[in-house]
Image (cartoon, rainbow, N blue to C red):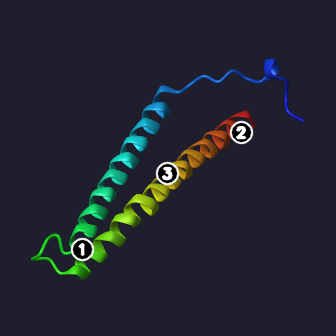
């Protein structure tokens, strides 16, 4: 059963963690926007709107743009979360070693 709200520890934001989270959010947003640009360019090429470029190149750009919009941000966020969890585990281990 969970603790009553009055007995739970108060959340105190860590400015360094907030700064890192903002940086990750900004990075993911930029990557998604660039993926959208690749997707739009690929669609334009695939529809022969840019005549000197062959259509298969457009299909490749469409796949790269979709991957950049969907796969890359998830991968980046997972790596960030894994790093944060590892840092917390190391900090907990250091505290438990200091106590013993």
Which badge, 2 or 3, comes first in the chain's sequence? 3
* Tags 1 and 2 touching, CB below 8 Å: no
What's the residue at 69%, 40% (across, down)? 97
Looking at this rendering, what residue extends furthest in the right direction? Answer: 1
| SS under mark 2 | helix
Residue of label 1: 47
What's the residue at 73%, 34% (across, down)? 99
Q: How far apart are marks 1 and 2 (CA)?
A: 62 Å
Other-residue count near label 2 (Cα within 10 Å), few / some / many at <14 / 14–19 / ≥20: few
Rendered image quadrant of residue 43: bottom left
Rendered image quadrant of residue 26: top left
Left or right, 81 with respect to 48, comes to: right
What's the residue at 9%, 77% (across, down)? 52
Other-residue count near label 3 (Cα within 10 Å), few / some / many at <14 / 14–19 / ≥20: some
Q: How far apart are marks 1 and 3 (CA)?
A: 34 Å
Q: How far apart are marks 2 and 3 (CA)?
A: 29 Å
**Which mark is on residue 96?**
2
Left or right, 35 with respect to 78, comes to: left
* Tags 2 and 3 touching, CB below 8 Å: no
Rendered image quadrant of residue 64: bottom left
């Amino acid at each position: 059963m969970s603790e009553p709200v009055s007995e739970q520890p108060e959340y105190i934001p860590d400015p360094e963690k907030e700064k890192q989270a903002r940086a990750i959010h900004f990075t993911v947003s930029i990557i998604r926007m660039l993926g959208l640009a690749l997707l739009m360019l690929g669609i334009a090429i695939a529809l022969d709107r840019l005549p000197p470029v062959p259509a298969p190149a457009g299909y490749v750009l469409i796949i790269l743009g979709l991957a950049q919009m969907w796969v890359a941000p998830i991968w980046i966020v997972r790596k960030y979360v894994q790093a944060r969890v590892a840092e917390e585990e190391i900090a907990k281990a250091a505290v438990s070693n200091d106590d013993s």
